[in-house]
Amino acid sequence: MIDFKCDYKKYFPADALSKRIAAMQPLVQKIIDDDFGGWLHLPYEYDKDEFERIKKAAATINSDSDYLVCIGIGGSYLGHRAIIEALGGERGRTKIIYAGNSLSARELESAIARIGDADFSVNVISKSGTTTEPAVAFRTFKNLLIKKYGAEEAAKRIYATTDANKGALHDEASEKGYESFVVPDNVGGRYSVLTAVGLLPMAVAGIDIKKVIDGAEEERRAQSEEANGGKAAQYAILRNLMLERGYDIEVLANFEPSFMYFNEWWKQLFGESEGKDGKGIFPASVIYSTDLHSMGQYMQEGRRALFETFVEIKDDYKGVSVPKSDENLDGLQYLEGRELDEICKIANQATREAHENGGVPIMEVIMPSLNEKSIGALIYFFELSCALSALTLGVNPFNQPGVEAYKTRMFELLGKPGYDK
């Protein structure tokens, strides 16, 4: 479903790709054997019973809540927010408010003010239940639920996505009777969007989660059946070849503003998976044509240490065209009657050609359309390519030891028991 293009022979020897393809299959086996490789076969091995409970819970939330507060940080919220916003946002009564992804008092107060007197429920997403940012937000919104509805009714409005057997949130959910969903032990946070972590918020938003899963499954089959290691493997190989040539910054580019949080999910996926042991490509992103008026100058003529990967949508979006004007004061007469999507695609082509002529290597990841199946496929494509790329680089794609450094120092400064010097 996902296509990948790169005229790599402009940058590398003609046999550069074929020489490395054979190394990919052993890396796929390493993912299968890893304790955190469960996402690889998730699109067909997912828990069907839990999937039905997720749909029922979403229907309940849609019936009794104007807002769902999704509390989580990192992989606990970026993936489903990426998909929801890319597909145009919530489609029904219940709107989603995100909390627990920062320590900003202003942001938390804004979320509380937005709810006002409306009815709301909470989906707290945390493997442990003790991560500072979501734990603070959960305590805050839990108190608001109890104040508004009473303890018994508040418990019915709390949905916990957490560890199946242990942890502070698991224990609280069991004690208080919250409906619970599972973060699988063998799926790490940034690879978890196709688990209950992402599926419940997406279902509440009105997204057909079965189609998302089906799209990921079609992509999984395509990658496993395709010759030459699959498109995801080719992308993984070429980005590492770019790094070897001194291109240590990758800029993910697209022409859809709704992909802003997809960019953020992609940056976490690759940054947290590869940035270890002094290694890794730095992941950055832009939204064109907006950022052509801010970052365009640097992309065209700045330091040549970066390459661009364009995410593109193949099909045409009809319905918005340039109106006619007898006065033609803006000089747009040559565009009158032309579809805006056509103009956007030409701007995309012009940007790629201009940047490549300016010395920026270009790669393209192409979706057939923008819908549930395609976005599920795109998620799986990048998850697989990221794991393969990290393994090619010689780092573990599934841990994040460096994240603990700031937490340790913060706990020392805040005086958390056990962290005093």
Image (cartoon, helix red, strand yellow):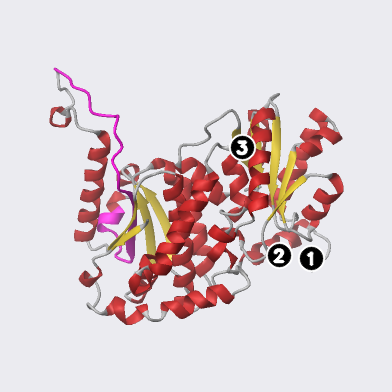
Left or right placement of residue 214 versus residue 408 in this view: left
Q: Secondary structure at mark 2?
A: helix
Residue depicted at x 34% and y 42%: 290
Q: Which residue is mark 2?
A: 408
Q: Is residue 333 above or below residue 211?
A: above
In the rendered image, residue 382 lying in the magenta stretch gets the answer: no
Front disc: 3 or 2? 3
The answer, for residue 77, to whether it is visible in the render is yes
Quarter of the picture holding the N terminus: bottom left
Q: Which residue is mark 3?
A: 97
Coordinates of residue 167 in the picture (x, y in percent):
78, 59
Residue type, label 2:
Thr
Write the start and end of the magenta stretch as one range.
Answer: 298-326
Quarter of the picture holding the C terminus: bottom right
Q: Which residue is mark 1?
A: 419
Coordinates of residue 207 in the picture (x, y in percent):
52, 40
The answer, for residue 395, to whether it is visible in the render is no
Are discs 1 and 3 less than 8 Å apart at CB?
no
User: In this view of the protein, which residue sits in the foreground, 52 or 318?
Assistant: 52
Left or right placement of residue 106 versus residue 21 in this view: right
Circle 1 residues within 10 Å: few <14, some 14–19, many ≥20: few
Q: Earlier in the sequence, mark 3 or mark 2?
A: 3
Are discs 2 and 1 less than 8 Å apart at CB?
yes
Q: Secondary structure at mark 1?
A: loop
Q: Secondary structure at mark 3?
A: strand
Residue type, label 3:
Ile
Give the CA distance from mark 3 to mark 2. 29 Å
Circle 2 residues within 10 Å: few <14, some 14–19, many ≥20: some
Occupied quadrant, residue 110:
top right
Q: Is residue 252 above or below residue 158?
A: below
Q: Earlier in the sequence, mark 2 or mark 1?
A: 2
Coordinates of residue 214 in the picture (x, y in percent):
49, 52
